[in-house]
Amino acid sequence: MNSIYRAGFVSIVGKPNVGKSTLMNKLLGEKLSIISPKPQTTRQQIKGILSDENRQIILMDTPGFVEARYELHNKMLEYINNSLKDSDIIIFMTDAKKFPTDYDKQIIQNLKKLPVPKLAILNKIDLTDEIIVDNKIELLEAYDFEKIIPLSVLRTSDFTSFLDGLTKLLPFNPPFYSTDEISDLPMRFFAQEIIREQIFLNFEDEIPYASTVVVEQYHDFPNKVIIAANIWLEKKSQKPIVIGKDGKKIKAIRLSAEKEIHKIVEKRVKIDLWIKIKPNWRRKQNALKEFGYR
């Protein structure tokens, strides 16, 4: 192994909907984290591994900081705190138009205690005026960041210099994971995340937040993948909404999820979905463990 090899863990933190998952997917060149316009889309820590002959950057996409109202929120905050403890670098992301919110200030205060390099990304600069962006950069300069990077994650296509800058801040280490891995999580995890993403994209109000998905069976054959998954809801009244008239809603979820998973596995994908009810599952530690919130 190269004696000047660098490897380490990089946490991406910030309030919901500032672009954390989009950034990680762009840096990896693969879609690992699911994305929707709704907060709390990311519920767990997801590692994405970027390796070459000189470096291994382990990116950790974290849930957005939320005020804990359910046991699920406590678990999400636990994922964030564990990521921060393990980090060699922290990327704080914020929205150029909305910064500084109370949540932003709270996150920055928490980050001050951590003795690792910290970068700030001022995202979505394409959606606000240049004068406002300059003003927000000035505000961020009052905090202890190694570098402040204004950009539009969605519109940026070349992250080479950004990744080179991250690499220089990483410690000298051999790789932590096999250099051909892109994540430490199995495909069945990403399958259930993709199904859940479709629920977030197809429904408003309470349904996305009251639902979770568990893949019960994942069979990988040479020319196809067959998946059996349960969609868990909190109330019986939510079941007909998810099914939709003549089963149209659940069919749309199934077909879209099959299409997205096909892009990853490059095989024919067949999903069978069932809907089950577990009242108030977000408030129950045992239910969270049962549903895979580690």
Image (cartoon, rainbow, N blue to C red):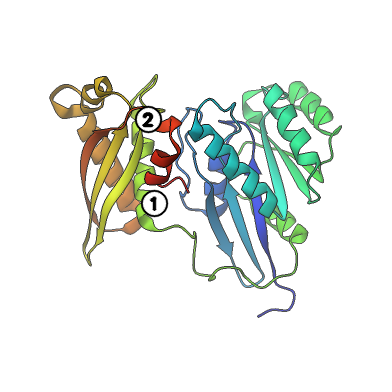
Label 1, residues with CA under 10 Å away: few <14, some 14-19, many ≥20: some
Q: Residue furthest right?
A: 142
Mark 1 secondary-structure assignment: helix
Looking at the image, residue 179 lies above or below residue 34: below
**Which of the two discs, 2 and 1, labels the residue nearer the N terminus?**
1
Left or right: residue 127 compared with residue 46: right
The residue pinned by badge 2 equals: 201
Q: Nearer the viewer, residue 32 or 210?
A: 210
Q: Residue at x 65, y 57 (%)?
A: 9
Residue 105 figure quarter: top right
The residue pinned by badge 1 equals: 189
Q: Residue at x 45, y 57 (%)?
A: 185
Nearer mark to the viewer, of 2 and 1: 1
Mark 2 secondary-structure assignment: helix
Quarter of the picture holding the N terminus: bottom right
Task: Tell me where residue 8 appears, x and y as whole percent.
Answer: 67, 61
- Amino acid type at mark 1: Phe
Label 2, residues with CA under 10 Å away: few <14, some 14-19, many ≥20: some
Left or right: residue 234 compared with residue 84: left
Cα separation, mark 2 vs mark 1, equals: 19 Å
Q: Nearer the viewer, residue 112 or 153?
A: 112
Left or right: residue 13 compared with residue 28: right
Left or right: residue 291 compared with residue 12: left
Task: Tell me where residue 116 appears, x and y as whole percent.
Answer: 78, 51
- Amino acid type at mark 2: Leu
Decide if residue 138 is in sight here. yes
Task: Tell me where residue 158 appears, x and y as whole percent.
Answer: 61, 50
Task: Tell me where residue 291 appears, x and y as whole percent.
Answer: 38, 44
Looking at the image, residue 50 lies above or below residue 189: below
